Amino acid sequence: MECIFCNIVERKAPADITHEDERCLVFRDIHPEAPVHLLVIPKKHVSSLLELEDTELGGTLLLCAKAAARKAGLTGYRVRINVGKQGGQIIDHLHLHVLGEPAKSN
Ligand code: 5GP
Ligand code: ZN
């Protein structure tokens, strides 16, 4: 089945990519709910947190979220995962939302 986030990983679909490493990719959400709204995804297709069994990948995604948030100028932020239809998950490729506002410099 066609997966939009897999297409972004394969550069078949456009995205504003801000960060990546060997196992994860980070790009800006097209409908941001905060001044900075990033999506952190595994490069390998995992449909949701319900399907995640790789503990190392889970840790990698969290550290990837932290690195991407820092890069985006966030010092405090929220990390959210919508799990399954009842949890508000629309895209069936595991993703962490990183939401925040860059700290004001003076
Ligand atoms: P969910 O409700 O599944 O946790 O969140 C999916 C998120 O993906 C939504 O916030 C939505 O705006 C975002 N989104 C959906 N399609 C695309 C897309 O093609 N590109 C990007 N950058 N974000 C998308
Ligand atoms: Zn996918």
Image: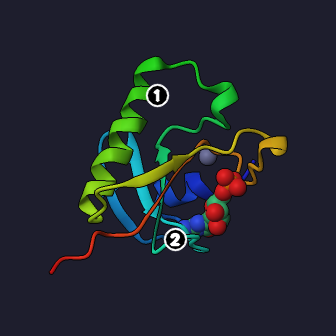
Measuring 60% from the left and 42% from the top, which residue is drawn there? 94
As drawn, which residue projects farthest toward the front?
A: 106
Q: Kindly indicate the quadrant of the structure image that contains residue 51.
A: top right
Secondary structure under the numbered disc 2 in the rendered image: loop
Measuring 31% from the left and 40% from the top, which residue is drawn there? 22
Q: Nearer the viewer, residue 21 or 12?
A: 21
Please state the horizontal and vertical placement of residue 79, each as a whole percent of the image.
49, 47
Measuring 35% from the left and 55% from the top, which residue is drawn there? 76
Q: Nearer the viewer, mark 1 or mark 2?
A: 2
- In the rendered view, tell whether residue 53 sits above or below residue 62: above
Q: Amino acid at mark 2?
A: Ala
Secondary structure under the numbered disc 1 in the rendered image: helix
Q: Is residue 3 visible?
A: no
Label 2: few (<14), some (14–19) or many (≥20) C-alpha neighbours in 10 Å: few
Q: Nearer the viewer, residue 12 or 42?
A: 42
Q: Which residue is mark 1?
A: 58
Please state the horizontal and vertical placement of residue 102, each as a whole percent of the image.
32, 69
Determine whether, in the image, residue 47 is placed left or right of residue 90: left
Of the numbered discs in the image, which one, if any, rests on residue 34? Answer: 2
Determine whether, in the image, residue 81 is placed left or right of residue 62: right
- In the rendered view, tell whether residue 25 sits above or below residue 63: below
**Label 1 close to label 2 by CB (< 8 Å):** no
Q: Amino acid at mark 1?
A: Gly
